């Protein structure tokens, strides 16, 4: 079984979209894959409730309990690796996980660590992407699914979706419209990758 471990920090709407798609499309039969666990760095993350309601194992690892990024990531690796096996490496999916990961963590899961970013990378890595796009006069914004590398918001692009900027748009309006597209492209990118591993 190919296990998918999803990391979240908040509502987990992309995680929920992945879980629903996996169930609807029968990833277990089709790819021999399942969402095995959802891990959050915040006990208050609403997405944990959704995961539990769908019979998915959940773990909380509060980053504030650790003295360093390295110590947190080392503890996170131990939890993820509980769902990992050499013959069936797990996919590790970042879905609104608001932590910058150490190079050692990223290196451990090279090729199977995915992220979704709310811009059309390589444009606007980092935070406040919608406002920055509006300030720059962009006519389109969007989202990118990519493999994670040590460089923040870089790495091979797996999928993108573009959303037009409409007259009177605000960062919040754009965020809502892009999120709808994120919920479509993230599960699709994961399914495409599952076919290859």
Image (cartoon, rainbow, N blue to C red):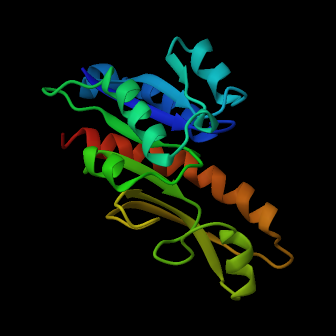
Would residue 121 be found to the left or right of residue 43 on screen?
left
Residue 23 picture location, percent across and down: 45, 22
| Picture quarter with the N terminus | top left
Q: Residue lying at the far bottom in this picture: please name it.
A: 137
Would residue 157 be found to the left or right of residue 69 on screen?
left
- Up-down: is 30 above or below 119? above
Residue 118 picture location, percent across and down: 59, 62
Would residue 13 be found to the left or right of residue 55 on screen?
right
Question: Residue at 65% across / 29% down in the picture?
Answer: 47
Residue 166 picture location, percent across and down: 77, 75
Question: Residue at 55% across / 28% down in the picture?
Answer: 61
Residue 15 picture location, percent across and down: 55, 35
Quadrant housing residue 67: top right
Question: Residue at 68% across / 38% down in the picture?
Answer: 10
Quadrant housing residue 30: top left
Q: Nearer the viewer, residue 192 or 68?
A: 68
Q: Residue lying at the far right in this picture: please name it.
A: 168
Q: Nearer the viewer, residue 122 or 21?
A: 122
| Picture quarter with the C terminus | top left
Question: Residue at 65% across / 59% down in the picture?
Answer: 178
- Up-down: is 176 above or below 89? below
């Amino acid at each position: 079984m190919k296990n998918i471990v999803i990391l979240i920090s908040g509502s987990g709407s992309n995680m929920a979209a992945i879980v629903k798609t996996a169930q609807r499309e029968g990833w277990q039969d089709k790819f021999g894959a399942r969402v095995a666990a959802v891990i959050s760095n915040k006990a208050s993350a609403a997405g944990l409730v959704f995961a539990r309601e769908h019979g998915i194992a959940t773990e909380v690892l509060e980053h504030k309990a650790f003295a360093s990024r390295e110590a947190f990531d080392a503890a996170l690796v131990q939890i993820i690796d509980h769902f990992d096996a050499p013959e069936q490496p797990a996919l590790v999916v970042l879905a609104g996980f608001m932590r910058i990961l150490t190079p050692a963590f990223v290196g451990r899961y090279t090729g199977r660590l995915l992220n979704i970013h709310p811009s059309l990378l390589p444009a606007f890595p980092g935070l406040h992407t919608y406002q920055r796009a509006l300030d720059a006069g962009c006519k389109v914004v969007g989202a990118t699914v990519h493999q994670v590398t040590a460089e923040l918001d870089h790495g091979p692009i797996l999928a993108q979706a573009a959303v037009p900027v409409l007259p009177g748009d605000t960062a919040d309006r754009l965020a809502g419209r892009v999120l709808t597209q994120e919920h479509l492209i993230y599960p699709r990118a994961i399914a495409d990758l599952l076919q290859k591993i």
